[in-house]
Image: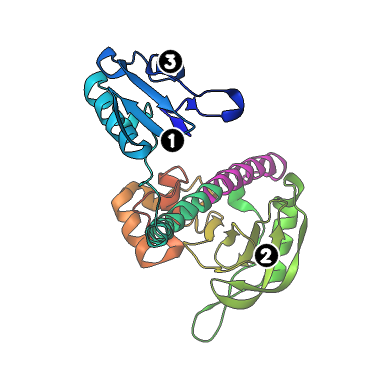
Amino acid sequence: MNIGGGVKSSRSKGLQGLTAEKFSCFGIGNFPSTVGRGLKIDFSKAKVRFSGEESDLSDSVKSLVSTVEKTAGLPRSQGYLLPRNDIAFTLAEVLITLGIIGVVAALTLPTLMNKINNSEKTAKLKKFYSVMTQAYTMAEQEFGSGADWEKEAPLRDDDNKLIDQPDAALVFFKKYFAPYLKVTDMGIKDLYNNGVLENKAYVAFADGSMVYLTNGNCIDFIYDVNGASVPNKFGYDQFDFLYCNKTYSNSFFGNENRYFGTYVQKYTEQGRDYNKEICAANGIYCTTLLLIDNWEFKDDYPWK
């Protein structure tokens, strides 16, 4: 038996005849003299004798607890008195609680995972832009201004649509960028680009990201933060960077002296709201929006 969170009865320890004055030793504190006077607990008979009256132990202890609460000002919630036996949870209550936890988790986990994924993409984009800019600068020191670097002229079909030339794109990359980058693999094979299976020149990096190379008016460096994994779409996991020679540098960068940068980097002059609008319309424009936002995926970024 446990009284007051500390008084324990044990016949083997000879606790019969324990008087109320002893309660102060077991965690109740200063037991009120008006309660303690004349109180004697006879454990062998499981009765409480108080001022000459005898009653069942359970009823008397409850009365004693109530008196101590009122007299000593010791709330039950602080654990000074007898533990309540009505605080157990029913199975229904447990199931309801688990259900609420499940609903909250279902609502919050996707948002949390999205933030984690965006943080990883931010780190990769920052690194890629940095190492590519450095590689470009080092290549200029060896080959001269990017204004006149050699690349194959663009090819077009009967509908004036550009025809990719993966071989030409890979030759360009190997000459001007590969010597200054750490890559794990490069070549040409069928890969999904913006959701379409195409024969593409590719470059793989140690962190699992890849670059698809396209030879058109400029050389497109389509950076895929998670490599060949889905969704392989602009704005989600693919982001377009360009090398353009002097013929197209002003058209895409708005600067005749810039030859490497983000797709239509000239639109930075239009401000963030404009770039967010065109990013929402077509994911290929999102690289410049991310450049403006220091490669961070803001809460209003269009592609979640």
Q: Secondary structure at mark 2?
A: helix
Q: Secondary structure at mark 1?
A: loop
Find out whether residue 142 is within the magenta segment: yes
Report the amino acid beneath label 2.
Ala
Q: Dot 3: within a 10 Å radius of its alpha carbon, few (fewer than 14), some, or many (20 or more) residues?
A: few
Q: Dot 1: within a 10 Å radius of its alpha carbon, few (fewer than 14), some, or many (20 or more) residues?
A: few
Say which of marks 2 and 1 sits in front: 1
Residue segment shown in magenta: 121-145
- What secondary structure is the magenta-colored segment mainly? helix
Nearest to N terminus: mark 1 or mark 3: 3
Quadrant where the image shows the C terminus: bottom left
Say which of marks 1 and 3 sits in front: 1
Label 1 to label 3, Cα distance in Å?
A: 18 Å
Find out whether residue 75 is within the magenta segment: no
Q: Which residue is mark 2?
A: 169
Instruction: Name which residue lies at 70% across and 59% down.
Output: 203
Find residue 46 and name its label. Answer: 1
Quarter residue 172 falls in? bottom right
**Circles 1 and 3 in contact, beta carbons < 8 Å:** no
Q: Name the spot of residue 160 as percent of width and height, x first.
A: 49, 80
Find residue 22 and name its label. Answer: 3
Q: Secondary structure at mark 3?
A: helix
Label 2 to label 3, Cα distance in Å?
A: 92 Å
- In the displayed structure, 192 sits above or below 269; it is below
Instruction: Name which residue lies at 54% across and 56% down.
Output: 241
Left or right of 160 on screen, residue 179? right
Q: Work out whether residue 84 can be spotted.
A: yes
Q: Residue most toward the bottom?
A: 158
Q: Work out whether residue 265 can be spotted.
A: no
Left or right of 30 on screen, residue 113? right
Q: Name the spot of residue 6 as percent of width and height, x first.
A: 47, 25
